[in-house]
Amino acid sequence: MNNFTQRAISGTVYVALISISLALGNWPAFCLLFLLCFLCLWEYKTLMLKELSTFQKAFFIICGLYLFGILGLWQFMYISRIFYGVGLLLTITLFITPLFKKHESPFDAIGRQLTGWIYIPVSIGLLYGLGYQKFLYLNGEIAYNGLLVLSVFILIWANDTFAYLVGKWLGKRPLLMRISPAKSIEGAIGGLLFTLIASVAIFYWQRQFTLLEYCILAILVSLGATLGDLIESMLKRSLGIKDSGNIIPGHGGILDRMDAVLITAWLVYFYFQLI
Protein backbone atom coordinates (compact mmCIF):
# COMPACT_ATOMS: atom_id res chain seq x y z
CA MET A 1 0.00 0.00 0.00
CA ASN A 2 1.55 3.31 -1.10
CA ASN A 3 1.77 6.42 1.07
CA PHE A 4 -1.06 8.25 -0.73
CA THR A 5 -3.48 5.36 -0.17
CA GLN A 6 -2.47 5.14 3.48
CA ARG A 7 -3.02 8.86 3.95
CA ALA A 8 -6.41 8.72 2.23
CA ILE A 9 -7.70 5.79 4.29
CA SER A 10 -6.41 6.96 7.67
CA GLY A 11 -7.52 10.54 6.94
CA THR A 12 -11.04 9.36 6.08
CA VAL A 13 -11.27 7.29 9.26
CA TYR A 14 -10.02 10.25 11.33
CA VAL A 15 -12.55 12.66 9.82
CA ALA A 16 -15.41 10.17 10.12
CA LEU A 17 -14.60 9.40 13.77
CA ILE A 18 -14.56 13.08 14.73
CA SER A 19 -17.70 13.92 12.73
CA ILE A 20 -19.77 11.06 14.14
CA SER A 21 -18.64 11.64 17.74
CA LEU A 22 -19.44 15.36 17.63
CA ALA A 23 -22.81 14.74 16.01
CA LEU A 24 -23.82 12.20 18.69
CA GLY A 25 -23.70 14.69 21.56
CA ASN A 26 -21.74 15.73 24.63
CA TRP A 27 -20.57 12.38 26.04
CA PRO A 28 -19.38 10.83 22.74
CA ALA A 29 -17.62 14.12 21.95
CA PHE A 30 -16.10 14.23 25.45
CA CYS A 31 -14.85 10.64 25.20
CA LEU A 32 -13.29 11.21 21.79
CA LEU A 33 -11.49 14.39 22.85
CA PHE A 34 -10.41 12.69 26.09
CA LEU A 35 -8.78 9.98 23.96
CA LEU A 36 -7.13 12.52 21.65
CA CYS A 37 -5.90 14.44 24.70
CA PHE A 38 -4.36 11.26 26.13
CA LEU A 39 -2.59 10.44 22.86
CA CYS A 40 -1.28 14.01 22.50
CA LEU A 41 0.01 13.99 26.08
CA TRP A 42 1.66 10.61 25.47
CA GLU A 43 3.48 11.88 22.39
CA TYR A 44 4.46 15.10 24.16
CA LYS A 45 6.01 13.29 27.13
CA THR A 46 7.86 10.97 24.72
CA LEU A 47 9.31 13.96 22.87
CA MET A 48 9.81 16.50 25.65
CA LEU A 49 10.09 14.66 28.96
CA LYS A 50 12.49 11.82 28.20
CA GLU A 51 14.66 12.34 31.27
CA LEU A 52 11.80 12.08 33.78
CA SER A 53 11.08 8.94 35.75
CA THR A 54 8.18 6.65 34.85
CA PHE A 55 6.26 8.00 37.84
CA GLN A 56 6.77 11.62 36.74
CA LYS A 57 5.67 10.84 33.19
CA ALA A 58 2.55 9.05 34.43
CA PHE A 59 1.85 11.96 36.79
CA PHE A 60 2.14 14.41 33.88
CA ILE A 61 -0.38 12.47 31.78
CA ILE A 62 -2.86 11.81 34.61
CA CYS A 63 -2.85 15.44 35.72
CA GLY A 64 -3.25 16.59 32.12
CA LEU A 65 -6.30 14.36 31.67
CA TYR A 66 -7.68 15.59 35.00
CA LEU A 67 -7.28 19.17 33.81
CA PHE A 68 -9.09 18.40 30.55
CA GLY A 69 -11.86 16.64 32.48
CA ILE A 70 -12.44 19.60 34.78
CA LEU A 71 -12.45 22.08 31.87
CA GLY A 72 -14.88 19.93 29.93
CA LEU A 73 -17.29 18.75 32.62
CA TRP A 74 -17.85 22.03 34.48
CA GLN A 75 -19.64 23.44 31.44
CA PHE A 76 -22.59 21.07 31.63
CA MET A 77 -22.65 19.56 35.12
CA TYR A 78 -22.07 20.60 38.73
CA ILE A 79 -18.57 19.89 40.03
CA SER A 80 -17.80 20.27 43.72
CA ARG A 81 -15.18 22.87 44.60
CA ILE A 82 -13.00 20.17 46.13
CA PHE A 83 -12.16 18.88 42.66
CA TYR A 84 -10.81 22.29 41.68
CA GLY A 85 -8.78 22.24 44.88
CA VAL A 86 -7.34 18.85 43.95
CA GLY A 87 -6.24 20.35 40.63
CA LEU A 88 -4.36 23.09 42.49
CA LEU A 89 -2.67 20.55 44.77
CA LEU A 90 -1.60 18.43 41.80
CA THR A 91 -0.02 21.48 40.18
CA ILE A 92 1.89 22.34 43.37
CA THR A 93 3.12 18.73 43.54
CA LEU A 94 4.84 19.35 40.22
CA PHE A 95 7.16 21.77 42.01
CA ILE A 96 7.68 19.51 45.03
CA THR A 97 8.62 16.28 43.24
CA PRO A 98 12.02 17.54 41.93
CA LEU A 99 13.11 18.18 45.54
CA PHE A 100 13.41 14.41 46.00
CA LYS A 101 14.88 13.56 42.60
CA LYS A 102 18.19 14.98 41.45
CA HIS A 103 17.91 16.94 38.22
CA GLU A 104 20.41 19.31 36.62
CA SER A 105 17.71 21.78 35.51
CA PRO A 106 14.58 21.15 37.62
CA PHE A 107 12.77 24.31 36.58
CA ASP A 108 13.39 23.51 32.94
CA ALA A 109 11.53 20.21 33.40
CA ILE A 110 8.78 21.92 35.40
CA GLY A 111 8.40 24.52 32.64
CA ARG A 112 8.11 21.86 29.93
CA GLN A 113 5.41 20.06 31.90
CA LEU A 114 3.41 23.24 32.57
CA THR A 115 3.75 24.17 28.90
CA GLY A 116 2.46 20.74 27.93
CA TRP A 117 -0.62 21.15 30.12
CA ILE A 118 -1.42 24.56 28.65
CA TYR A 119 -0.66 23.46 25.10
CA ILE A 120 -2.69 20.25 25.12
CA PRO A 121 -5.42 19.65 27.78
CA VAL A 122 -6.36 23.32 28.20
CA SER A 123 -6.57 23.77 24.42
CA ILE A 124 -8.61 20.60 23.90
CA GLY A 125 -10.79 21.50 26.88
CA LEU A 126 -11.57 24.86 25.27
CA LEU A 127 -12.26 23.08 21.99
CA TYR A 128 -14.81 20.83 23.68
CA GLY A 129 -16.30 23.84 25.44
CA LEU A 130 -17.08 25.53 22.13
CA GLY A 131 -20.16 23.34 21.99
CA TYR A 132 -21.57 25.14 25.03
CA GLN A 133 -20.75 28.71 23.98
CA LYS A 134 -23.62 29.02 21.53
CA PHE A 135 -26.53 26.87 22.67
CA LEU A 136 -28.34 24.47 20.40
CA TYR A 137 -31.96 23.78 21.28
CA LEU A 138 -33.51 20.38 20.58
CA ASN A 139 -37.10 19.67 21.64
CA GLY A 140 -37.05 22.80 23.77
CA GLU A 141 -33.96 21.76 25.74
CA ILE A 142 -30.34 22.87 25.58
CA ALA A 143 -28.15 20.31 23.82
CA TYR A 144 -24.47 20.05 23.07
CA ASN A 145 -23.75 22.02 19.90
CA GLY A 146 -21.52 19.43 18.28
CA LEU A 147 -22.26 20.77 14.82
CA LEU A 148 -20.67 24.08 15.78
CA VAL A 149 -17.49 22.31 16.93
CA LEU A 150 -17.57 20.22 13.77
CA SER A 151 -17.80 23.40 11.68
CA VAL A 152 -14.54 24.59 13.28
CA PHE A 153 -12.90 21.29 12.36
CA ILE A 154 -14.22 21.59 8.79
CA LEU A 155 -12.75 25.07 8.45
CA ILE A 156 -9.40 23.82 9.77
CA TRP A 157 -9.42 20.91 7.34
CA ALA A 158 -10.28 23.25 4.46
CA ASN A 159 -7.42 25.57 5.39
CA ASP A 160 -4.86 22.77 5.79
CA THR A 161 -5.87 20.93 2.62
CA PHE A 162 -5.92 23.92 0.29
CA ALA A 163 -2.88 25.59 1.84
CA TYR A 164 -1.01 22.40 0.94
CA LEU A 165 -2.48 22.09 -2.57
CA VAL A 166 -2.11 25.77 -3.51
CA GLY A 167 1.38 25.82 -2.01
CA LYS A 168 2.36 22.81 -4.11
CA TRP A 169 0.94 24.44 -7.24
CA LEU A 170 1.83 28.11 -6.87
CA GLY A 171 4.09 28.34 -3.82
CA LYS A 172 7.25 30.38 -4.41
CA ARG A 173 7.77 32.65 -1.41
CA PRO A 174 8.42 30.90 1.95
CA LEU A 175 6.04 31.85 4.73
CA LEU A 176 8.64 31.39 7.47
CA MET A 177 11.83 29.85 6.11
CA ARG A 178 13.51 29.44 9.50
CA ILE A 179 10.66 27.32 10.86
CA SER A 180 9.07 25.56 7.88
CA PRO A 181 10.67 26.03 4.45
CA ALA A 182 7.92 24.03 2.71
CA LYS A 183 5.13 26.43 3.69
CA SER A 184 4.57 29.34 1.35
CA ILE A 185 2.80 32.69 1.44
CA GLU A 186 0.79 31.64 -1.62
CA GLY A 187 -0.31 28.47 0.19
CA ALA A 188 -1.40 30.45 3.26
CA ILE A 189 -3.44 32.83 1.09
CA GLY A 190 -4.99 29.92 -0.80
CA GLY A 191 -5.89 28.22 2.48
CA LEU A 192 -7.55 31.42 3.73
CA LEU A 193 -9.58 31.89 0.53
CA PHE A 194 -10.91 28.32 0.53
CA THR A 195 -11.64 28.53 4.26
CA LEU A 196 -13.77 31.59 3.53
CA ILE A 197 -15.59 29.64 0.80
CA ALA A 198 -16.16 26.79 3.25
CA SER A 199 -17.54 29.25 5.83
CA VAL A 200 -20.13 30.46 3.31
CA ALA A 201 -21.21 26.85 2.71
CA ILE A 202 -21.46 26.28 6.48
CA PHE A 203 -23.57 29.43 6.79
CA TYR A 204 -26.15 28.04 4.37
CA TRP A 205 -25.97 24.65 6.13
CA GLN A 206 -26.27 25.74 9.78
CA ARG A 207 -27.21 29.45 9.90
CA GLN A 208 -26.24 29.78 13.57
CA PHE A 209 -24.50 33.12 12.89
CA THR A 210 -24.67 35.82 10.26
CA LEU A 211 -22.64 35.41 7.09
CA LEU A 212 -20.23 38.12 8.23
CA GLU A 213 -19.69 36.35 11.57
CA TYR A 214 -18.94 33.09 9.76
CA CYS A 215 -16.42 34.87 7.52
CA ILE A 216 -14.69 36.38 10.57
CA LEU A 217 -14.67 32.91 12.12
CA ALA A 218 -13.01 31.58 8.94
CA ILE A 219 -10.28 34.23 9.12
CA LEU A 220 -9.56 33.42 12.78
CA VAL A 221 -9.52 29.68 12.07
CA SER A 222 -7.15 30.13 9.13
CA LEU A 223 -4.85 32.29 11.27
CA GLY A 224 -4.98 29.87 14.21
CA ALA A 225 -4.44 26.81 12.01
CA THR A 226 -1.43 28.37 10.29
CA LEU A 227 0.10 29.47 13.60
CA GLY A 228 -0.59 26.06 15.16
CA ASP A 229 1.11 24.32 12.25
CA LEU A 230 4.14 26.61 12.52
CA ILE A 231 4.39 26.15 16.29
CA GLU A 232 4.35 22.36 15.89
CA SER A 233 6.98 22.67 13.16
CA MET A 234 9.09 24.80 15.52
CA LEU A 235 8.81 22.09 18.17
CA LYS A 236 9.80 19.31 15.80
CA ARG A 237 12.63 21.34 14.26
CA SER A 238 14.06 22.04 17.72
CA LEU A 239 14.08 18.27 18.35
CA GLY A 240 15.32 17.35 14.88
CA ILE A 241 12.38 15.07 14.04
CA LYS A 242 9.93 14.86 11.13
CA ASP A 243 6.80 13.55 12.89
CA SER A 244 5.57 13.57 16.48
CA GLY A 245 4.72 9.86 16.22
CA ASN A 246 3.53 7.16 13.85
CA ILE A 247 0.09 6.21 15.16
CA ILE A 248 -1.72 7.44 12.01
CA PRO A 249 -0.43 5.68 8.87
CA GLY A 250 0.82 8.19 6.32
CA HIS A 251 0.18 11.18 8.60
CA GLY A 252 2.48 10.72 11.60
CA GLY A 253 1.32 11.32 15.16
CA ILE A 254 -1.79 12.73 16.79
CA LEU A 255 0.03 15.98 17.58
CA ASP A 256 0.74 16.31 13.86
CA ARG A 257 -3.02 16.13 13.19
CA MET A 258 -4.10 18.27 16.14
CA ASP A 259 -1.50 21.05 15.88
CA ALA A 260 -3.84 23.46 14.09
CA VAL A 261 -6.66 22.75 16.54
CA LEU A 262 -4.61 23.49 19.66
CA ILE A 263 -4.08 27.16 18.81
CA THR A 264 -7.36 27.71 16.93
CA ALA A 265 -9.40 26.65 19.98
CA TRP A 266 -8.13 29.65 21.99
CA LEU A 267 -8.93 32.18 19.27
CA VAL A 268 -12.38 30.78 18.52
CA TYR A 269 -13.32 30.43 22.20
CA PHE A 270 -12.48 34.12 22.71
CA TYR A 271 -14.37 35.07 19.53
CA PHE A 272 -17.49 33.27 20.73
CA GLN A 273 -17.49 35.46 23.84
CA LEU A 274 -17.87 38.49 21.59
CA ILE A 275 -20.67 37.42 19.24
Image: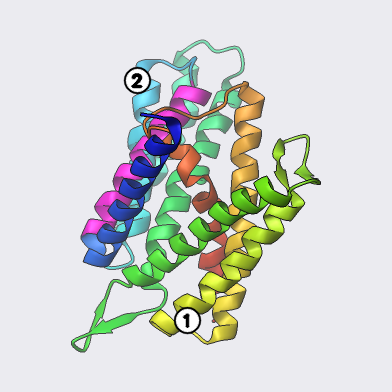
Q: Position of residue 27 (x, y in %)?
A: 22, 59
Q: Is residue 83 visible?
A: no
Looking at the picture, tell me which residue is in the foreground, 64 or 209: 209
Tell me the quarter of the picture where residue 151 sits.
Answer: bottom left
Dot in front, 1 or 2:
1
Q: Position of residue 222 (x, y in %)?
A: 61, 61
Total count of labels: 2
Residue count near mark 1 (Cα–Cα under 10 Å), binned few <14, some 14–19, many ≥20: some
Tell me the quarter of the picture where residue 29 sits.
Answer: bottom left
Q: Name the image quarter holding the N terminus.
A: top left
Residue on which the image places disc 2: 55
Q: Earlier in the sequence, mark 1 or mark 2?
A: 2
The Cα–Cα distance between marks 1 and 2, rounded to whole angstroms, is 48 Å
Q: Residue at x 51, y 10 (%)?
A: 102
Q: Amino acid at mark 2?
A: Phe
Magenta part mainly helix, strand or loop? Answer: helix
Is residue 56 on the magenta stretch? no
Q: Residue at x 40, y 15 (%)?
A: 53
Q: Which residues are drawn in magenta?
A: 28-49
Q: Is residue 81 visible?
A: yes
Local secondary structure at mark 1: helix
Tell me the quarter of the picture where residue 250 sits.
Answer: top left
Q: Position of residue 11 (x, y in %)?
A: 38, 45
Looking at the picture, tell me which residue is in the foreground, 70 or 255: 255
- Residue 54, compared with residue 185, is above or below; it is above
Q: Residue at x 62, y 36 (%)?
A: 233
Looking at the picture, tell me which residue is in the foreground, 245 or 189: 189
Residue on which the image places disc 1: 203
